[in-house]
Image (cartoon, coloured by chain):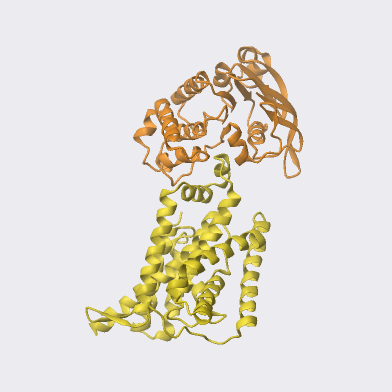
Amino acid sequence: MLNVEKIQLKYGNIPVIHDVTFRVEKGEIVALVGGNGNGKSSILRGVAGLLTPSLGTVSFEGRDITKTQAFDIVSLGISLVPEGRRLFPSLSVYKNLRLGAYLTDDGKEIEKRMDYVYSIFPTLKERKDQRASTLSGGEQQMVAIGRGLMSQPKLLLLDEPSWGIAPKLVDKIFEVIREIRNNGVTILLVEQDVQEALEACDRAYVIQTGRVVMEGTGRDVLNSELIQKAFLGL
Amino acid sequence: MEGVLAQTLASGLLIGFVYALVAVGLTMIFGVMDIVNFAHGEYLMISMYFSYWFFILFGMDPLYSLPAITLIMFGIGIITYYIAIRPIINAPMLSQIFVTFGLLIFLRGVAQFLWKVDYRMIPETLASGNINLAGIYIGRPQLVAAVGAILCYGVILWFLKNTKTGMALEAVAEDKEAARLMGINSNRMFALSWGIGIATVGIAGVLLSTFFYVFPEVGGAFCLIAFVVVALGGFGSVVGAFLAGIIVGLVEVVSGYLIDPSFKFMFVLALYLAVVFIRPQGLMGK
C-alpha cells in the first residue's frame, strides 16, 4: 500500500533521514520505533507531504506521491495525526472534527463519520461544544485521532499517540488503534513507548540516527537483544 | 451641557463603528497570515476615489455604487496578494514590512500622479442631511456609515463562525501546518483573506466618502487609527477590533470635547501606549 524507497529528508541543509526504506501493507499496523531525535517524526512528515524528500521516492497504492503537497495527499486517503496533536485550540471539538472532513461537503456523510468518531470516543460527544484547548491531554489526543479519521483515510499516520497522556490512558489509546485497524484502516505509527508500540503492531522498524537498523514482526523486534538492551534497559 | 455630551458620545460611537470596519480587514489579514499591511489605508483611499469618480462620471450615488466597488476591491485584494505578497510569505518579517510599506508609497504616488493633491468631496448624496434623535442631531451620512459598518461586520462574523470556508480561515490562522493536513490549501485562504480584508476597507471607504474629503493622503490618518484599534483589540481578533474601534471613537471625541479637539489623537495614541505597556496582547488577543 505504502512504499518508501531510499528516502533522504533534510531540514535546511542538514539531513535527518538517510536512505530509509520500508513498506506498509493494507490492513497492517506498522510501527517505527526508536529514541527521541532519531528522525521518526520526519519520516511521517515526509509521507504526509509536509517535508519533500530530497532523494528517494514515496508511493501510495502504486502512485508516486513524493512531491505531492500535503493538502492534496489528504484527498488520496492518507491522514496524519501530528506530533503534539496540533488541534485548533480556540475552536470547538465539533469544529475541529468538522475541519477534519474539510474535503467533503456532503452533510449526511459528515454526520456518519462524526457518529463513528463519537462511537469510538463517547466523551467527545459530551464535549463537542467545548474549546479544544480546555480538554485534558487524553481528550485532546482523542480529538486529534478523531479529526484524522474524519477524512476517512485508508492510511492513518499516528505520531506519538501516547505523548502527554496519563499512563493508564495509553493502553486505552492503543486498544482504540487496534479497533480502528479492525474497521479497515491501515496504520503507520511512530512511538517512543517502545514496549506498547511493539505489542500493538504487526511489524516494526527500528530507526536509529536516521537509518533503519532492524525490522521484523512486533514480537521478534520486542524480543531482540537490541531492543531489550537499548530501549527497555533489560 | 448634557446635550452636548450626548451629542459627542453619539458621534464618537458612530465614527467608532467605521474605525472598527477599517481595522477588521487589517486584523484579519494579520490573523490569517501574520503579515502587517502598512498600505491598508491606501486601499481605503482607492475606494474613496472609486466612489468619487463613480459619482462624477456616471452620476452614481455612493450607496448605489457600493456593491460594485466592494467587488472591485475584493479583486484588487486578491491581485495584490498574488503579485506582491505571495512571493514574500516565507521571507523575513523585515522584507514583508518593506513590501507593504513600499505598496503604501506606490499607491499614494499613483493617486497623486493621477488625481493631484486636491481635496475632493462628493457634493450631495442620498445619505446627506441631519436627523434629530431625541434632541441629538446626527449627521445622516455618519449614521448610514455606522449602520453599514455594523451590517458588514455582522456578515463577516457570521461567515467566519458558520461557514466551512470561514472555519478554514480560522484554522489557518491558528495553525497553518495542521490546516494543510486537513486538506486546506493555505495559499487560497491567504488570497481570500486579502480579498475580504481589502473589500471591507473598501466598504469603509465608500461609506466615508459620503461625508469626508477624498485626497491621496486620506488613508494615513485612518490607517494609524486602525493600528491603534488592532493593537487594542488584539492582533488577529475580529471581535476585538470591533470593540476597540468603538472605544477609540469614543476616546477621540470625548477627549476632544473635554480638552481640545486638536489634542484628540494624543489621547488615542496615549491609549495605544497604555495598551502596549499594560496588556500587549490587547483586549481579545491570545
Question: Farthest front residue?
Answer: B58
- Give percent across and percent down for residue B85: 64, 60
State which quadrant residue B46 falls in. bottom right
Q: Looking at the rendering, in which quadrant would you find the C terminus of chain A?
A: top right
Q: Is residue B229 left or right of residue A13?
A: left
State which quadrant residue B8 falls in. bottom left
Asked whether residue B227 appears in the rendered view, the answer is no
Chain identifier, colour orange? A
Q: In the figure, B279 relative to B104: above or below?
A: above
Q: Looking at the rendering, in which quadrant would you find the N terminus of chain A?
A: top right
Nearest the viewer among A13 and B34 is: B34
Q: In the figure, A109 relative to B146: above or below?
A: above
- Give percent across and percent down for residue A67: 71, 39
- Give percent across and percent down for residue A78: 59, 32
Q: Is residue B13 left or right of residue B110?
A: left
Question: Farthest left residue?
Answer: B134
Q: In the figure, A137 relative to A213: above or below?
A: below
Chain identifier, colour yellow? B
Asked whether residue A199 appears in the rendered view, the answer is yes
The residue at the point 61 percent across, 12 percent down is A219
State which quadrant residue B84 falls in. bottom right
Q: In the figure, B43 relative to A211: above or below?
A: below
- Give percent across and percent down for residue A4: 71, 27
Nearest the viewer among B191 and A44 is: B191
